[in-house]
Image (cartoon, grey):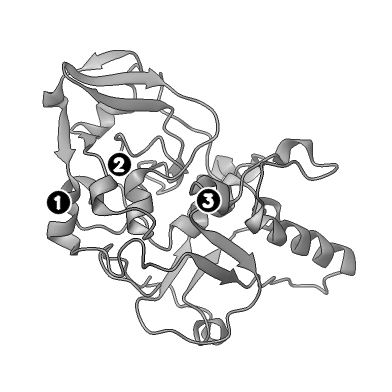
Amino acid sequence: MRFRGSAARTSTTRPFTAAAAASLGISVFPTSTYFDAGQEAHSHEIGHQWINFLPQASLSIGTPHWPLSSLASGLMGFSIPGSGAGGDYSCRLTSIPTGVQLTAFSGARSFSDLDLYLMGLKSAAQVADHYVWKDQQAAMTQNCLGVANYAQFNKVTINDVIAVAGPRSPAYPAAQRDFKVAVIVLSDAKITPEAMAYTDYFAQRADARAAERPPGVPFRRGQSVLRRTGGAERCRHGCATARAPGTFVTVFEFYAPLARSLLPHPRTSRKPTR
């Protein structure tokens, strides 16, 4: 992506040569079962083009997701220790005068304010302070109830982020908001017209304006990137036509073994005990 201020770095994994010549970045899905541009997983993978590669001390421990923190209950989740897989943190942390309020959370997830800042969809002034558990191992089994003392957290401000990564450039509202997404299907056998129609249908859901459920697929009701960014970003099914200078990010999501048997979510269902 053509931007600065997130410290996004090129993956050590070799990119697809032909695609790299005309693309800003690549996201790799491990199986077609998980590919649906109107589902949470697709928005999550698109988010990895910006998130999280920050070298800030408290946040970098969660790379390429967030550490257990007030950011982890958002769409980008947290990195499960040992596997690097993305997990859903079902505890919402809210700053109150007496400490950090812990509230059980479930339901549709959206990008956090810091996510949107890194994507160029919010200004620095719109990003709240965030709180990262000092003891990440203990936080995995922390009951999501009551108020935790501020002494248990490292506070991270937007100024802390800018100090190590620089200001986001181009900044909101000048940052790019519309993206064309080319879908490349790799197969060891000839792909049937029916299979291509399947892929094409789910690719076009990237620009869905409303939460929808595909016909005959009851478990795949979801929301597109457009909705998960509050209408701020669009990903349109198409082909990139020109190479752009700047950081090139190849994203490979890593999965816990259990995730391969789970539908429809491509990330592991393991969560901290509440």
The spot of residue 119 in percent (x, y) is 38, 59
- Residue appearing at x 17%, y 58% in the figure: 162
- Please state, as top left, top right, bottom left or bottom right, where the C terminus lies in the image: top left
Q: In the image, 132: left or right of 79?
A: left
What amino acid does circle 3 point to?
Gly
> How far, Cα to Cα, is label 1 from label 2?
19 Å
Q: In the image, 159: left or right of 73?
A: left
Extreme front residue here?
173
Query: Could you tell which of marks 2 and 3 lies nearer the N-terminus?
Result: 2
Crowd rating for badge 1 (residues with CA inside 10 Å; few <14, some 14–19, many 20+): some
Question: Quarter of the image holding residue 77?
Answer: top left
Query: Could you tell which of marks 1 and 2 lies nearer the N-terminus?
Result: 2
- Residue appearing at x 64%, y 39% in the figure: 262
Residue under label 3, please give it.
Answer: 231
Question: Quarter of the image holding residue 134?
Answer: top left
What amino acid does circle 2 point to?
Pro
